[in-house]
Every structure is written in C-alpha cells, then in structure tokens.
Image (cartoon, grey):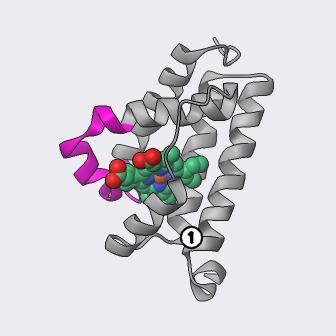
C-alpha cells in the first residue's frame, strides 16, 4: 500500500527501486554500466543522502550534481530523451510507492533539477530536439 515518505528508510526504498529500473532500462542502463560494475553501493548511498537532503534538509550531502553530470556528458553524451526517460521512471517509481506532500515535493524537485541540468549541459540544438 502507498504511504507517505516519512524517513530515511523510505528514501532508501525510493532510491533502490528507482535505480533498479534505471539499470535495466534500454535508454539509461548504459550510462550506469561503469558505476554498477565498480561502486554501485557507494552510488546508492550518495543518492540516499542527496534525496534525504532534498526532502528533509538533513545537510549531509555535499556533492555537486551539475558538475558530475557535466563530466559524465563529456564521456557519454546526455540528451533530451535520456532526461525525459529519467524523469518518467523517477515519477513512476514515486507514484508506485508513495503518496502525500513529500512525494509531490520530490517529483517537483526532480523536474526542477533535471530542467536546470539540461539548460546548463545540453547545447541549444540538443535542447530543441
Ligand atoms: C539523463 C539523465 C541522467 C543520467 C544518465 C544520469 C547518470 C548519472 C550517473 C552515471 C551518475 C554516477 C556518476 C559517478 O559516480 O561517476 C550520476 C550521479 C548522480 N546523479 Fe544522475 N543522471 C541523470 C539525471 C539526474 C537527475 C535529473 C538528477 C537529480 C534530480 C540526478 C542526480 C544525481 C546525483 C545526486 C548523483 C551523485 C552525484 C555525486 O557524486 O555527488 N541525476 N548520475
């Protein structure tokens, strides 16, 4: 049954459910192949902290996602369909598991961050594709 996002364990469930989908996804899986082979648990733990900070203002995430994805783009080009797929799977995962204000907040924040990433990382031509 769907529940509110109430604490760290819920965030862990969201992160693991989402990245399980991503890893098996035709559009997105290949971006994560290296991370999956080398430091998958570390990746998940970073994402636990990232989303906990977004939802509960825990203050224990100190990374720079924009910079991380700029570097990723340099090695493996990101594009608009990949961001659209990422957002689709993220929203689908949240909707399958959770309901309530925090569930709405997390989807809204994912959309804002994905939009900023695309504006800052993709070229004007790629943005219009
Ligand atoms: C096309 C869409 C996306 C792809 C293919 C993608 C892929 C990746 C990959 C491969 C990493 C691991 C980098 C590494 O450890 O070397 C990563 C890290 C991360 N991603 Fe994404 N990502 C996408 C969109 C997003 C969006 C929209 C968000 C946030 C709303 C996000 C949040 C993060 C965060 C927080 C990290 C960890 C950064 C750190 O190391 O501090 N990603 N992503």
Relative placement, left or right, of 69 versus 42 is: right
Residue 67's x, y, as percent? 48, 62
Q: Residue furthest left?
A: 37
Relative placement, left or right, of 73 versus 2 is: left
Q: Which residue is mark 1?
A: 80
Closer to the camera in the image, 55 or 107: 55
Residue plotted at (61% across, 72% down): 120
**In the displayed structure, would residue 59 be above or below residue 85?**
above
Q: Residue furthest right?
A: 101
Residue 72's x, y, as percent? 38, 65
Closer to the camera in the image, 8 or 128: 8
Relative placement, left or right, of 108 versus 59 is: right
Q: Residues within 10 Å of mark 1 (few under 14, many from 20)?
A: some
Q: Picture quarter containing residue 4? A: top right
Residue 102's x, y, as percent? 74, 26
Q: Is residue 74 magenta?
A: no
Relative placement, left or right, of 79 versus 27 is: right
**In the displayed structure, would residue 21 be above or below residue 87?**
above
Residue plotted at (24% across, 40% down): 39
Residue plotted at (47% across, 36% down): 47
Residue 29 seen in this snapshot: no
Is the magenta region chiefly helix, strand or loop? helix
Quarter the C terminus occupies: bottom right
Disc 1 under 8 Å from ligand 1? The reply is no
Residue 33's x, y, as percent? 25, 52
**In the displayed structure, would residue 74 be above or below residue 96?**
below
- In what element is the residue under mark 1? helix
Q: Residue furthest bottom?
A: 125
Quarter the N terminus occupies: top right
Residue 119 seen in this snapshot: yes
Start and end of the magenta stretch? 25-43
Q: Is residue 42 magenta?
A: yes
């Amino acid at each position: 049954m769907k529940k509110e996002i109430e604490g760290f364990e819920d965030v862990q469930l969201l992160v693991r459910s989402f990245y399980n989908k991503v890893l098996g996804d035709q559009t997105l899986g290949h971006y994560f192949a290296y991370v999956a082979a080398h430091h998958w648990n570390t990746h998940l733990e970073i994402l636990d902290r990232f989303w906990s900070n977004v939802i509960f203002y825990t203050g224990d995430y100190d990374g720079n996602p924009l910079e991380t994805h700029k570097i990723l783009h340099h090695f493996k080009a990101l594009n608009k369909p990949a961001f659209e797929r990422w957002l689709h799977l993220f929203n689908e995962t949240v909707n399958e598991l959770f309901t309530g204000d925090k569930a709405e907040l997390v989807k809204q924040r994912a959309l804002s961050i994905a939009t900023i990433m695309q504006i800052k990382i993709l070229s004007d031509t790629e943005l219009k594709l």
